[in-house]
Image (spheres, rainbow, N blue to C red):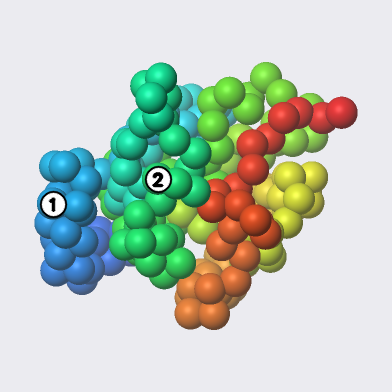
Amino acid sequence: MYRNHLKRILDFSASTMGLLLLSPLFLTIAISLFFANNGKPFFFQTRPGKNGKLFRIIKFKTMNDKKDASGNLLPDADRLTPFGAFLRKTSLDEIPQLLNVIKGDMSLIGPRPLLPSYLPLYNDFQRRRNEVKPGITGWAQVNGRNAISWERKFELDVWYVDHMSFLLDLRILLLTVKKVFVREGITQKGQATTTYFKGNE
């Protein structure tokens, strides 16, 4: 009942209310990034959703588009702006994903949507993370976020798929609020962003 019906109703209701309540902050950040990023306050990227169906995720743009002499984008660490770093540390860059939840591409709680290029690299166990909609936050995020290994992250994602419930989602939501305030596990040591998944060796 919860997995197939109630979760979607709660997602839509909570995301709509959250977006309305956060609209002044949303507009303030969007305007600030519009001027800071040459008129580009938002970051769009294709991600896999439930059953691998692709959708366009939306986040606040935290990195600029600076390139090297050959026209290639500079490393993430060199393109992450001070304001962008602040948005990531506070998770404010995730606010626009409420639009993805309202649309139905995502859930508030679920495995984080990763890159499409990872899909053929998953083994059968890891692929099970796509049996549910991806979330803005999830079980892996409150148990280490980007500071844990890929193997552990997938284990936590699949555990969530098998144990999804209202009480678990509520627990994850409360733990997420705590994690945001203490700013734990935002990146791996020595990395501006999480490392790329290169498959199972």
x and y, in percent, of residue 144 in the image: 68, 63
Front tag of 1 and 2: 2
Q: Is residue 96 left or right of residue 127?
A: left
Residue extending furthest right?
201
Of callouts 1 and 2, the N-terminal one: 1
From the image, tell me which residue sits under label 1: 35
Q: CA distance from mark 1 to mark 2?
A: 16 Å
> Looking at the image, is 181 positioned above or below residue 58?
below
Between 33 and 132, the residue placed more toward the observer is 33
Location of residue 94 with respect to 53 vertically, above or below? below
Estimate the x, y position of residue 165 in percent, counting from the top left. 61, 61
Point 64% across, 43% down: residue: 195
- The amino acid at mark 1 is Phe
Q: Residue at x 40, y 29 (%)?
A: 68
Which label sits on residue 79? 2
Picture quarter containing residue 27?
A: bottom left
> Which element is circle 1 on?
helix
